[in-house]
Each structure stands twice: as C-alpha cells, then as structure tokens.
Amino acid sequence: MERLRRTMMFIPASNPGMLRDANLYGADSIMFDLEDSISLKEKDTSRFLVYQAVKTLDFGDTETLVRINDLEQGGRDDINAMVRAGIDVIRLPKTESADDVHAVEAVIEEVEKKCGREVGSTKIFAAIEGPQGVLNALSIATSSPRVVGIALGAEDYVTAMKTRRYPERNSDEIFFARSMIVHAARAAGIAAVDTVFSDVNDSETLRREAEFIRQIGFDGKSVINPRQIPVVNSVFRPTDKEIRNALDVIDAINEAEAKGSGVVALNGKMIDKPIVERAERVLMLARAAGIDVEGKGE
C-alpha cells in the first residue's frame, strides 16, 4: 500500500520538547534535523537526543526520517546512530548525483550488517537543493531500491540560481525544479515532496502553494511549524464530489467484472486504467483523512 506523505514536518533535533511531542502534531512523516538547524557545538548532543527518541518513543504509523550532515562532517556518525536506533529513512541533504546516494547507501549497509538490522530496511529520501541535482533528478531517483522519495530544497536552489523566492508571484523561479523533481519521481515510482514555505503566519499563501503542488503531481509538502500541517493536509483531502465520482468508477468496474464485460463506461465516458488508478488514490487519501468513504456513495 502506498504510504502517505502529505506533510513532512521538520523537527529541530536540539529541542527535546518537540522530539517528545513530534507524533502528536498530525504529520504523515516527521523529520529530525541534525543538519542546518543545529549549531556545530550542539551536533553530538542533538544526535544523542534523536537516538533516544527513536529508540524509546512509539511513533505508531508515522514515518520517521533524519536529515543527516555531510558524510565527512558528522554524517557517518549520524547514520551509525540512527540506523541502530531504528529510523525508517535517512534524508540525504544537498544531493547532486547518484554517486551521493551510493556513498550514503554503503555506510547504511555497513551499519545494518554490524547491528543485525535487515540489509535494505533503512530507506533513503534524497533532497535536491541545487541546479546540478535538479538536472540529475532522474538518475538520483533511480539510483537505488532504497530511495523512496526525492524532495526539493528551494532556498539553496534559488541562491545557486542567483535569484530569491517570490511566493507572491507564484514561485515561478522554482517551477522548472519542481517539474523536474516530480517527473523524475513519477518515472521512478517514488514520492515527490515539495519545499518548505517559511512564513508560518501566512496560511493563505501556504494553501495556494499546496494547491498548486498537488495540481502538478507532488505527494506532499515539507512543513516547519505544526500550524502548517492541517492547512496542507486539508488541501490533499478529497472533496465530496471527488469521492462520489471515485466510488462510481470503482462500482462501474466491479459491475463490469461481475458481468464478464471488458468494456466499462460511466455517464457515457469510457473508463480505462488511469481513471481507475486516480479513483483508487482519491479513496486512499479520503480514508487517510478519516472520511467515511462508504457513506459518501449514497
């Protein structure tokens, strides 16, 4: 079954309170940040805090990730601790090529073997944050069976492109990067997660961004504040009309199969495989949002 990643919440690894409460916020995925949000003098302590949290707290069905440092700047220690703790996913920052993934993968596998964890069970989420990574998005997305998703990190990207963020102008400056990442993810059959929106007080622009990235095919969006989670999750919540239409599609398919018919139509329109897949995804998103799907078909 496809894992939902509508919201991926950044949790500063140096904040014990947020580590403790991370699973209460309602994000589909929680990402403990050992990289940019942590000062050099706090790295070791923060790593230990996350290790203890992952090792001892029950996160239920919520996916746990950790954003590691560069391999030569503490990343190896990050991987060693997190794999042993039982983290679900290692998030690789500033991914430029498939070689970056392979280097991290080798360290992960070494630790898995040493600690007795099943080889291959620790997954990778690659963050693409520069023009080279954007141009290599497909090779990154297909670099390893461990890679379950790719994400856009827009702040470093726009700096490298000699521009800045323009959310008030529909973020045209990152449209190419978004398109490359979502196409690469779809071609590879993995998840695509959009960049953060940094103004936690502007929920309206956040909603517009979330609506746009859903429209072009992203699975979800990174968030930096608990208040952003319900806004983004609600955008990925199907409408009653979408649910009823999806149920009608599934009913039509089931009825045709029962009759042994290979031709399926609904309201005069042919139903083919892509339409069925979209209907199934609508129902999955609806159930994840706690909607009584069966009750919508009346």
Image (cartoon, rainbow, N blue to C red):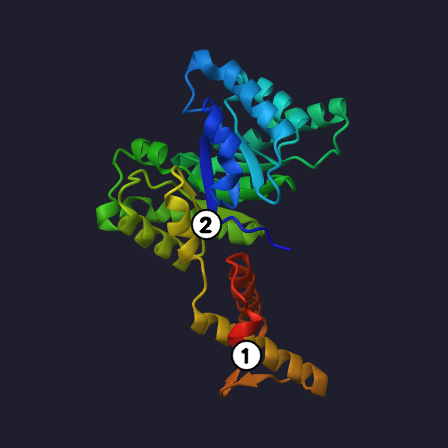
Q: Please state, as top left, top right, bottom left or bottom right, where the N terminus lies in the image.
A: bottom right
Q: Position of residue 153 (x, y in %)?
A: 40, 37
User: Which quadrant holds residue 265?
Assistant: bottom right
Q: Image point 50% across, 40% down: which residue?
A: 24
Q: Amino acid at mark 2?
A: Gly
Q: Image point 49% across, 88% down: which residue?
A: 268
The answer to whether 246 appears left or right of 119 in the picture is: left
**Residue designated by label 2:** 220
In the image, farthest residue toward the top? 41
| Residue 99 disc label | none
Q: CA distance from mark 2 to mark 1?
A: 26 Å
Mark before the other along the chain sequence, 2 or 1: 2
Q: Image point 56% across, 49% down: which residue?
A: 190
Identify the secondary structure beneath mark 1: helix
Label 1: how many Cα within 10 Å (few below 14, some 14–19, many 20+): some
In the image, farthest residue toward the right? 116
| Residue 248 disc label | 1
Considering only vertical position in the picture, is 3 above or below 162? below
Label 2: how many Cα within 10 Å (few below 14, some 14–19, many 20+): many
The answer to whether 235 appears left or right of 43 in the picture is: left
Q: Image point 54% across, 79% down: which residue?
A: 248
Q: Is residue 104 or residue 161 the one in the foreground? A: 104
The answer to whether 280 appears left or right of 120 in the picture is: left
Considering only vertical position in the picture, is 193 above or below 53? below
Q: Amino acid at mark 1?
A: Asp
Q: Is residue 99 or residue 62 the one in the foreground? A: 62
Considering only vertical position in the picture, is 58 above or below 79? below
Can residue 85 be seen from the camera position used here?
yes
Q: Position of residue 61 (x, y in %)?
A: 61, 45
Can residue 73 be seen from the camera position used here?
no
